[in-house]
């Protein structure tokens, strides 16, 4: 029965992607991409990847849609007619696709427990991580402990993306008060509901942050959800008020301090005489040390991801306001 | 199959029916406002019925509390979303399919 | 039927990948190209997660002994890749905004023949 859900969801995913090709209205393309993200989050749940589904729903359908809409506000919402011939792209795509389909026939069958991918390190993670690290959620154990160095790299990539966006766009604070009225300024219902929901969303983000050891969640998801709460505030009440709550300068310090917190745990464990990011030495008991280590580095990841996402939103939104004035 | 299971499956079935009729309405209704009405059916009455059906399947533990939280959150946010959509469409000058375009502007186009 | 169930996920992955690839090489508008890149990226995510699935398994969160779990490793890789993906998408979109400001257009065939305006 579960195979049928998988089949139908993947079919809907393919149809959504196909529709994107033929649409000329970019606003509709971005909305379809949001639907595509939600559908892929559903597929991830069917395929047992609850943590991934969580992230995809928060990131794909929340943050990227807002960023793409912000870009569309500056670049215009229709795609112009293309004069190029479609023949060559179709040819290239069909030949590559046929080769890849031929290649998939050599793949091990879907879902077979004897596949090579399940033989190498996975049994170690599944059988030993609850004892070695002491956390029920194996994804968090692998993310923060076994592959902690990898995750440090990913956090640094997210941090450098914020540097890239700031270098390209920058954030302009509007000192004069003649900013154009946001469409939602008069919207009393939306403002009241936003006031009710924003604290709940932040509370949920904190739950996801600190409950990530036991259920789906962790620093990446929590950072994105908390950023989404502030983005909602910025959209409903205007960018100036949102910047008064958390200033862009403070966000830069936050983003850097998250990465520093993460790397600091690594350095601290080196000073204790272990390897970089060896949490066993953080406390007298190895399992307790793992707990402290994972808690702190997840906090570092959460702070960095939150600050980076909100910085990127500020950069895009201040560009839109600037072009509205001109 | 005990009594609670029967009630629960009835609720789930009713929820699916409303979700389906919302989806049909999204395609068949003539203009934007009626379509928003159809779409809001799926995340109000259909969601209430489905979560009520699922609540009867839990053994009144943490999952029950989570489902109730989801229900409360949906009941606050989804009518707001529909309201904001309809209001901004009206603000942007979209007319009902029964209205005629006037001199002040306003269009009668689809979606 | 068995052959279809064994490879259906991978075929959809290839289809999505080629759809994204087609949008990237045929679309003229840069924002649409970014959407195509994102579809391509999601298809790779889908492939990793499909490989990690074990039939009859459950999400890799310990419930009790003797339970079959899916492979947690692809989940870890993809979880971080999604967040990195949105960060790099943001960099791409800000490049598009700069191109719009420098050339006044985001249609590829309109600005590629112009002189450097920056």
Image (cartoon, rainbow, N blue to C red):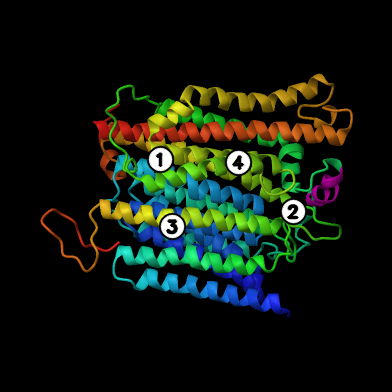
Locate residue A181, reporting x and y percent. 29, 37
Q: Position of residue A183 (x, y in %)?
A: 31, 43
Q: Secondary structure at mark 1?
A: helix
Q: Which mark is residue A61?
A: none
Discs 2/1, front: 1
Mark in front: 4 vs 2: 4
A8 in relation to C101, above or below = below
* Chain ID at mark 1: A
What whole-number distance in Å separates the C-alpha atoms at marks 4 and 2? Answer: 25 Å
Q: Is residue A83 visible?
A: no
Instruction: Give me the C-alpha separation between circle 2 and circle 1.
Output: 37 Å
Percent position of residue A318, x then y:
37, 31
How far is the residue under mark 1 from the one under mark 4?
20 Å
Task: Using residue A167 as the reference point, say whether residue C71 is left or right of it.
Answer: right
**Secondary-structure class at tag 3:** helix
Give the labeled residue for mark 1. Answer: A235
Residue annotated with mark 2: C60
Q: Residues within 10 Å of mark 1 (few under 14, many from 20)?
A: some
Q: Residues within 10 Å of mark 3 (few under 14, many from 20)?
A: some
Residue A151 relative to residue A87: left or right? right
Labelled disc at residue B79: 3
């Amino acid at each position: 029965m579960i195979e049928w859900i998988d089949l139908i969801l993947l079919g809907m995913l393919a149809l959504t992607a196909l529709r994107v090709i033929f649409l000329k209205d970019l606003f509709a393309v971005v909305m379809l991409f949001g639907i595509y993200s939600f559908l892929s989050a559903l597929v991830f749940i069917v395929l047992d990847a609850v943590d991934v589904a969580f992230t995809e729903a928060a990131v794909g359908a929340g943050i990227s849609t807002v960023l793409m809409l912000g870009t569309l506000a500056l670049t215009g919402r229709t795609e112009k007619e293309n004069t190029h011939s479609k023949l060559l792209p179709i040819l290239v795509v069909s030949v590559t696709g046929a080769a890849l389909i031929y290649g998939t026939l050599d793949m091990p069958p879907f879902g077979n427990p004897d596949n090579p991918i399940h033989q190498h390190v996975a049994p170690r993670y599944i059988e030993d991580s609850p004892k070695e690290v002491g956390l029920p959620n194996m994804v968090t154990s692998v993310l923060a402990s076994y592959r902690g160095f990898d995750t440090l790299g990913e956090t640094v990539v997210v941090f450098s993306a914020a540097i890239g966006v700031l270098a390209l766009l920058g954030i302009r604070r509007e000192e004069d008060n003649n900013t154009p009225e946001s469409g939602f300024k008069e919207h009393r219902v939306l403002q009241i509901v936003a006031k009710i929901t924003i604290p709940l969303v932040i509370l949920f983000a904190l739950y996801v942050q600190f409950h990530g050891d036991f259920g789906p969640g962790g620093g990446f998801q929590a950072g994105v959800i908390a950023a989404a709460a502030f983005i909602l505030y910025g959209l409903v009440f205007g960018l100036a008020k949102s910047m008064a709550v958390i200033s862009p300068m403070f966000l830069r310090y936050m983003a850097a301090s998250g990465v520093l917190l993460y790397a600091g745990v690594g350095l601290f464990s080196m000073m204790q005489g272990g390897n970089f990011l060896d949490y066993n030495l953080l406390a007298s008991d190895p399992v307790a040390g793992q707990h402290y280590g994972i808690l702190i580095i997840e906090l570092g990841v959460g702070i960095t991801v939150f600050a980076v996402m909100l910085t990127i939103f500020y950069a895009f939104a201040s560009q839109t306001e600037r072009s509205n004035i001109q | 199959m005990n009594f609670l299971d029967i009630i629960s499956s009835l609720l789930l079935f009713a929820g699916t029916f409303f979700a389906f009729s919302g989806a049909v309405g999204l395609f068949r209704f003539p203009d934007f406002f009626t379509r928003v009405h159809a779409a809001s059916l799926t995340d109000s009455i259909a969601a209430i019925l489905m979560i009520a059906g699922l609540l009867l399947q839990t053994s009144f533990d943490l999952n029950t509390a989570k489902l109730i939280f989801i229900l409360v959150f949906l009941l606050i946010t989804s009518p707001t979303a529909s309201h904001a959509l309809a209001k901004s469409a009206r603000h942007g000058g979209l007319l009902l399919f029964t209205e005629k375009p006037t001199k002040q502007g306003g269009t009668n186009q689809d979606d | 039927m068995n052959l279809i169930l064994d490879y259906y996920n991978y075929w959809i992955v290839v289809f999505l990948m080629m759809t994204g690839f087609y949008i990237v090489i045929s679309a003229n508008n840069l924002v649409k190209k970014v959407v195509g890149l994102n579809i391509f990226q999601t298809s790779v995510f889908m492939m990793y997660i499909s490989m990690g699935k074990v039939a009859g398994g459950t999400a890799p969160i310990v419930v009790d002994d003797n339970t079959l779990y899916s492979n947690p490793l692809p989940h870890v890789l993809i979880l971080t890749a999604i967040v990195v993906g949105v960060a790099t998408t943001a960099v791409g979109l800000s490049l598009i905004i700069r191109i719009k400001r420098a050339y006044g257009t985001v249609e590829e065939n309109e600005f590629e023949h112009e002189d450097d305006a920056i």
